[in-house]
Every structure is written in structure tokens, then in C-alpha cells.
Image (cartoon, coloured by chain):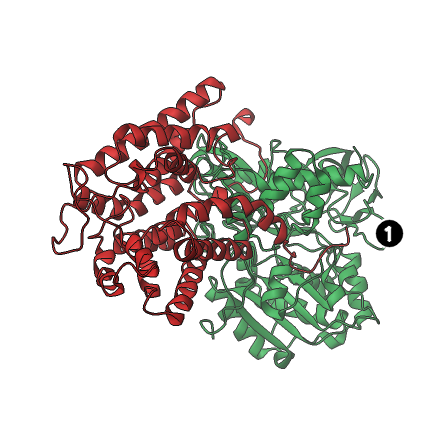
Chain colours: A green, B red
Amino acid sequence: MISKARATFPGGVHPQENKRFTEGRPIEPFAAGKQIAVILSQHIGAICKPTVAKRDKVQAGQVVGRAEAFVSAPVHSPVNGTVKDIALQSHPVLGRAMAVIIEPDPEAENIKRPCPERFGPDFDASAWSPEAIRDAIQEAGIVGMGGAGFPTRVKLEPNPQKPKEVVIINGCECEPFITCDYRVMIEWTHQVLAGVQLAARAAECSNIKIGIEDNKPEAIRAMNAAVKECREAKNITVVPVKTKYPQGGERQLIKAVWGKDVPVGGIPPMIGVVVLNVATCAAIAEAVVCGSALTHRVVTVGGSSIARPGNYYVPIGTTVADLIEHCGGLDDKIAKVVLGGPMMGFAIADLSTPITKTGGAVTLLTKEEITRAKYDRRQTPCIRCGRCLQVCPAGINPTKIAHAVKHGMLDVAERHHMNACIECGCCSYICPANIELTGYIKTGKILTARAKKLMPQ
Amino acid sequence: MLERITVSPAPHVSKAHSTRSIMLDVLIGLAPAMVMAVVYFRMRAVLLVAACVVACAATEWVCNAIRRKAQSIDDLSAVVTGVILAFSLPPAAPVWLAALGGVFAIAIGKMVYGGLGGNTFNPAMVGRAFLTVSFGMLMTTWTVPATIDPSMPTIAPTNTEALTQATPLAWSKEAIKGKADAEVVRKQLPAAITGQIGGCLGETSALALLIGGVYLLVRKTITYHIPAAVLLAAAILAAVGYLIKPGAYVPPIFHVASGALLFGAFFIATDPVTAPLTTKGMWIFGAGVGALVMLIRIAGELPEGVMYAVLLMNGLTPLIDRFCKLVPVGGKTNA
């Protein structure tokens, strides 16, 4: 079964997996620290407005920010406590963003334990109507937890012009070091499946495929066993896909398990596909069945030099500093703190940056690991070897685009399909001349958006 | 603590290779041919390679120094150019000629374009073309390997140091004109495979070149597209000629195994700087090289045409790149 299917996509690279540090560590609950900063912009779409004021008391699960727009998701307090301030906080992607800063009540326990035991093979999604499921998802503030943060409710909304043909569940987790989705799949298998069935019902589509990279045989086995027992067994297929980065990219996964390409500039619903991450599915199950909001997520704190790496069930808004301290603190060897994995994650300078709904990992890289890569290694001229073209999963010409951006020729970059870039980092990874191709292309996209006044200066 | 943390764009890890390691792989790929060159031509091989490499590296150093640029010889690309240039020289070439070729290859073939990555034409071939045009006689005097079978057809010695001999390709040229027995030409095939023939320093042993080429393919230093296109195009054209008039033309395998075709297909045409970027472009480029080589060999005045074929196609590379537009996954954008 596993060896048979090697579904995949063209291009891609094979970075060192480095999952051994945390893949054997069960998910542990994580107590809230001294301060929680719930960022008001944790998703794609309208930014939330705070619904609480300074010195207000808040309860765990209470809404603290909300926007009226359709493409948006409310944010909630993960703890009982007092609103200390509403202020700018470091944000891994945006630089700075407004956040509701909450001081947890020292008397309260403020530790949430996951509840996978509430879900079993006899789970029946038909007890809820599709509308009820969608509303519960929206109320719980669920967004795509794999990284993009697109509001899940919007994805699932049925479109009479283009009915959903398939719901694809993303259990690839192709980034090195990260194991949070893997642990969720093997520990919360039935909860994930309950979420999958609920999501499919909400999307009004019964065809479900679960894509898992074949370097996770344990997860494939657990999922297959659970699928066999569940009510929707005949509609759900577990598809082992080839272990290759970026297999977990939405477009790459659709190509591998469904054989179709998402149009450039488009989104999967345009071809009748919904892709949901396994952690998102677990959150959906909890939101619909237990009525709890998305206030906690599993975060992998990984790295070769950290004392206690692991997978933690963390209140959203916890600072990176709290997590690192819990895991043994920074030592002299660590040279880079990355929110996310080493291929697409964001290197942060401010350790008070809070965890968001989309941040599945904190990866601590040693000087040695990044020296082998780009850090203080000389960038040499492009020798036009074409390796970046060979590995590019978007099928574009990274070196041409990067050099066009470097020389300020944004029109040339656009003509070479700069906006088809998925920013996976394969080109920079493979470049023997050490050129930050992905960095240039990202810069080009931002400059173009600014020139078109789609983005503030 | 904070000042120790590095911030840079993703990705934060990368494959452990570099321009230098790629060039080193090319040098390892050239090693079998080097061994054969030393076996056949003894000290001459060592002297010529050393002269070219030293001249290339020194020229690059001087050019960088004049332009006050960071030194770049540690990327080994000048060394590769030197070895390839030396391998494409006749074994009897004087050392000063080799050194002059090296200076020209790097100064005019590479550094005037701004250094590595900027040049349009393969530097080693630029150097060789300069020598061929300027010192025609020295560039076409072929000494035979020291280990050659004395029963092979030879030309009367023209200098006292060694026997000289028409190369197999020169013989095949004579055969086309009806001046040589095609049977004699055919007998040279086994010799061409081991390298027991006259020819340029590094190109005589087809087997050594193949081993080196396979090494480059296995190491993924080069992709198979260009060598495959060059060899296929050349073999097809040779086969056409052979089928039309078997008496005058030599079989395709002879063309592939002799002269600089294998050397060119694996080591010269695959120079990434001067070859197209896209897979489709590589096929067009390689097929162009192979076809031009055969056109020159069969219809041209010269017995061998790898150098001119590569240079011509190098000139076309920007056009090929422009022609081979990529369609991104998910179709063209509306931008």
C-alpha cells in the first residue's frame, strides 16, 4: 500500500528531515506564561477590532477581537485574566501588529488539556447541519493552521457554480524539524477524522483524500486503521505521497493526489477543491462538538542543540521566549530563531513575538547548521547552472526573476511570472552560488504591490 | 543575547554545495582523460596542462587586481578552463602557445565580460579559436601517442621529437574525397576508443571521456540533455551519410568515438554559463552543436568542428533562452 503509491509533483528538493528530535515526543499541555499577546491579525483578510478594553476581565474562550468582513476570523483569549493593554507587538511576517495583551489570572490554572478521547470511531457528522458546522467554525475563529491562515469558513462555503469535487486533507508536513501535525495524526487520530467528516459535510462534498508523506508510516497506519472503523470509510482514502519538499504546499498536494493544477493567482475552490491541514481538522472537531474556540495549538519546539525539544499544546499568544525558556533556553550555539520551519519560516529578532494560529513551530538553528547554508558564506555570480529551474515546483525561472528584481526591472520579473512563485525556497536552497533567489522574488512581489498601491509604503 | 541572533530571508538551510564544489566535480570528471593523456603523451601532457592552468589562474588574478575586485580563483572555474583548453591542444604544441591561449581565454573570453557567469562564449574555446587562427601550423601538428602500434598508418615524421600522424578524422575526410581507403579508416575505430590515435591531448580516449561523463551525470553536475542531444544529432547525421554512401563515409560510431565529439558533448557544450537554462533550450542547443559538428566534418574544409560548433551555438544561447518561454504550473498569468 505504502510502496505502491508515489504520487507527487514536478520539481522540489530533499532537505535533511531532522524530525528525529521531536517525532517521538507526545503532545504536552503548556501553561500560560506571565503574558499572552493575542494578535488581531492572524489570518488573511480584514483585521479584527478589539472588543475588550484595558483593565477588562476576560474568560478563556472569550472573543477579544472581531471584524465584520466575510473574509476574517475572530480571535479569543486563551486564558482567564485581565487585559493589560492593546498595543503593537512584534509579528513574524508583518513586522508589527496590534495585539490584545492579557495578564493571566495567577489564581486560575490556565492550562488547557486536549480532549481527543471525546472522539471515537462511531462519530456521526450528520448530527449537525452544514450551516451549523460552518457557523461554529466561523465563531471559533478557525483559519488554515498550516501556515497561510485563510479563514476556513470561507474555504468551505459552497459555491453553486463550482461544487466541491474533493476535500483534500494535508498531513504532509514536509518542512524539516516540524512534527506537530505528525503527533496530531497519531495521537488525535479520531478527532482529526471527526473534523474531516464535519468539514466535508460543511463543504457539501463526500469525496475525501488524506495526503500523508511516506516518511510517516506510523501516521499512515494510524489514519488507515481509523478510517476503516469510521462511518464515512467508503468515501475516505489515505494517499501516501512521495517525501519531497514542498509536498505540503497546497498546489503541490492537489497535483499529487488529484492531478490538477490550480490556476496562477487563483485558489483551490476555483477547481472545486478544498485543502485543509490536519491540525485545522482537529480544531474543527473541537469547535463543533465541544464549542471551544481556537485558542491553543500544537507547536513543535525543535532544534539539534535545545535541551528539551518537544511538541507542546500552547496557548495562542504565548511568547517565543516563554517557549524557549521552557525547553531549556538558548545556548551559545544557537544562531537563528525561526518561527516555522527552516525552509519557509521567518527568522525573528524579537523573542517577545507571540505564537499565532498559523505558527506550528519554533525552530532553533545552530551556527553550524546555518553556516553550511547561507550565513557568512560568500555569494558568487550566477553560473546559469539551471538548478533553480529544475527544482522550482511553480515551473518558473527564479534566476531570471531574481536578477530582474535586483536590477529594478519589475516589469521583466512580472513577464517571467513572478506572481506564480509560491515562495517555497527550493531555488535558494539549491543555488550553488548562494544567491538568495527567494528573498529577491519576495522583495519583487512587495515592490510591485507597493507600485500598484495595493500595499502601504 | 539578542545581538547574536541572525535574521535573514528564508530558507535558512541550503544544500551543501557551491560553485567551487561543482567545478571540482568537473575536474574529477576530467581526471580519467588526464590519466590517459599522461599515459600517451607523458611529460608533454603534464607540461601543457600546467601551463594552461597557471596562465588561466594568473590572468584571472591580474584582471581582478586591475579592477580592484575580490579575488575569485578559489572558485576553480579558471582551473577548469585551463584543463579544457590544454586538453584541446595538440600534444606537440609548445608550452608558450598553451600559456598564451590560457591568457587569451581568461582575459578576452571571460574577464572582459565581468568574470564568471557573464561571458557569452566558452572561454576555453575562445582561447583555442584564437590559437587556431593565429598559429594554424602549430595547432594542426599531431604527434602520435608514445604507446602507439607501429603498424598503424603514419605520415613521415616532420620533426625529430616524435612521429606525427593524420588524425582519424583527417583520414575520414580523405575518404570522403576518395583519397583514402575507407577500410583503413574503419580499422582505426578500436584505437579511437582506447585513445591509441593522434589527436588533441585529452580527446583521444573515448573510454576515459565516457567514464568522466558518466561521473558528472551520476553526481548531477550536468544533466543528460546536452550530451544526449549532441551525440544523437551527430549520430543521426552521420548515419544518414553512411547509409547514402557507405564507401565514402565512415559509420556513425566512428564519428562519435573520434575527435572531440565526446569531449565536447560532456565537458565543453555543458558549460552552464554559455548553455541555455531551460530543458527545451538544452535540447535545441545540443542538437545544434551535434548537427554543426557533422556539417563541418562532412561538408566543411576542416576535419573537426567541435570548437566552432560550440562557439556558434554559444552565440545563439540568448536567443534560445528567449525562445523557450516557460509556462508556469497553473497556466499563464493575466498580468
Q: Residue furthest left?
A: B150
Q: Which of B256 and B57 is in front in this view?
A: B256
Residue type highlighted by circle 1: Ala
Q: Where is residue A123 in the image (x, y as percent from the top left)?
A: 66, 75
Q: Where is residue A127 in the image (x, y as percent from the top left)?
A: 75, 75
Q: Residue furthest bottom?
A: A234
Q: Position of residue A405 (x, y in %)?
A: 66, 37
Tell me if A371 is positioned left or right of A265 in this view: left
Residue B128 seen: yes
**Up-down: is A206 above or below A80?**
below
Residue A105 seen: no
Which of the chains bears the disc numbered 1? A
**Up-down: is A288 above or below A39?**
below
Tell me if B18 is positioned left or right of B259 in this view: right
Mark 1 secondary-structure assignment: loop
Q: Which of B65 and B205 is in front in this view?
A: B205
**Up-down: is A19 above or below A339?**
below
Q: Name the residue under label 1.
A: A69
Residue B78 found in image quarter:
top left
Residue B105 found in image quarter:
top left
Kindly identify the residue that appears in the image at 50 percent across and 68 percent down: A6
Tell me if A60 is positioned left or right of B187 in this view: right
Residue A81 found in image quarter:
top right
Q: Where is residue A337 in the image (x, y as percent from the top left)?
A: 55, 37
Kindly identify the residue that appears in the image at 42 percent across and 68 percent down: B240
Count the labels in the image: 1
